[in-house]
Image: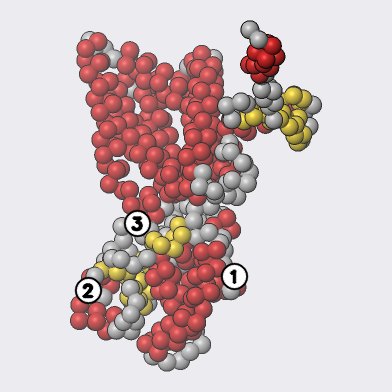
Amino acid sequence: MNLLEKLKMPKKEAAGTNLSPPETSVFWIETSNSVARCFQFEPDGQLSVKIVDDSRPVAQRIVESFVNKFFPSGYPYSVNEGYLRYTQFRALQHFSSAALSVLSTQSLLFAAGLRPTPAQATAVSWILKDGMQHVGKIICSNLGARMDSEPKSWRILADVLYDLGTGLEVLSPLCPHLFLEMAGLGNFAKGMAVVAARATRLPIYSSFAKEGNLSDLFAKGEAISTLFNVLGIGAGIQLASTICSSMQGKMVVGPLLAAVHIYSVTEEMKATPVNTLNPQRTALIVKTFVKTGKISSPADLRYQEDLLFPGRIIEEAGNVKVGRALSSVVRPSHLHRFKEVFPEEKFVLCPGPRCTDMILEHNASGEDALRGWLVAAYASAMEKSFHGSRENVLQEAYEKMNDVFCPFLSELQAKGWHTDQFLDGRGSRFAF
């Protein structure tokens, strides 16, 4: 080996042993609301978050942990107004319902055991009882369009039916010889209630969705329902083994739980700002606009809705009634005359002594219903001071509607109303 090779050798070894400097991870610490979090990028590019300091009180930690698990991400900014009140009474509703169901199940078992029949006959009776629930589901499934139109009223009716069915089950030990009849009717009512409750769940949840977070909202709502169902079952077991171990106790506690249940679901529905157009909400929007020139938002309108009698006619909105069959409103010989009053519109207005019937075309939207409703409301107001033929009054009202409709519709949509559909609950429509 010559001198030149000896001089080169250390350089090669040094080059071979030269290691690249170790990669340093990027991290930073953010402090918010007494919580310090360390954010760090891992070598694989993933971002990890660790809490390094938490000086919040224990109670506050529990509350925030509960909110994170049972409320949608970003709450309260990711939901519409009224969601908290809706959730509070939804929890109370499921708690009372679950407790009541434990009492009804106990009563059914007592009634089945008191029957002086063989075990096989009792089993057949139990199967027939469950079959009645499926019959109730099938019958109620034909009313889906009406539930779309009035989801809040149908949701309340669903719980009333459920409590009626549960009440029959609770009372079954008083007449064990009628076990099949009472249990069957109870399950029939509960089957209808289950279909109505499930069918109205989506439009109710949709009314609270604010940032495209319907799935998150739905999942968290069901989590709350499950939690309080479990708590209610526990309370029901405790009641069944103490106060409600006798029939007298059930007769006292059962109605109280049912009253809490119905009150809770009623308050839930009052807090729900449904933003689709149906006859009642359209009439209330038009009434407010004609009287004050203002447009109510879904949150403003929720406490004005009549949940017991949603089909009532509102005088200040033109006494409009939607959904009657065309043949019962207009004589065939007069149909073209009514249609020619507004030839370009998708509605026909037929003023009568008590109300103004509005019949929509098959493809009429919420905007068409609003146009017709505004014409009827303006015409009703003009008739009190305008002395002329009914056709002239309608023409004056129609021109006034056209003058205000564009800004009216823009503001209505800006308030969050969906005007692409009009949910009239399978009311009669026509087509030329």
Crowding near the residue tagged with mark 3, few <14, some 14–19, many ≥20 C-alpha atoms within 10 Å: some
Q: Residue at x 53, y 19 (%)?
A: 234
In the image, what residue type sits under mark 2?
Answer: Phe
Residue farthest toward the front in the current orientation of the protein = 2
Disc 2/disc 3 C-alpha distance (Å): 21 Å
Q: Earlier in the sequence, mark 2 or mark 3?
A: 3
Which of these two is toward me, 282 or 220?
220
Numbered disc 3: secondary structure: loop
Q: Which residue is most to the top?
A: 1
Give residue 263's quadrant in the image.
top right
Q: Position of residue 64 (x, y in %)?
A: 67, 31
Tell me the CA gap for discs 2 and 1.
36 Å
One can see residue 364 in this view: yes
On-image quarter of the C terminus: bottom left
Report the residue marked by disc 3: 425
Q: What whole-number distance in Å separates the C-alpha atoms at marks 1 and 3? A: 27 Å
User: Where residue 279 appears, x then y in whole percent?
Assistant: 42, 62
At 54% from the left edge and 49% from the top edge, which residue is drawn?
Answer: 210
Q: Which numbered mark, 1 or 3, is in the foreground of this view?
A: 1
Across and down, in percent, residue 37 comes to 72, 29
Determine which of the numbered discs, if any, sits on residue 294 in the image: 1
Quarter of the image holding residue 128?
top left
| Amino acid under disc 1 | Lys
Q: Eyeballing the image, is 129 above or below 330?
A: above
Q: Mark 2 sits on what residue?
A: 432
Q: Residue shown at 42%/68% (left/top)?
A: 367
Q: Mark 2: give few (<14), some (14-19) or many (20+) Cα within 10 Å.
A: few
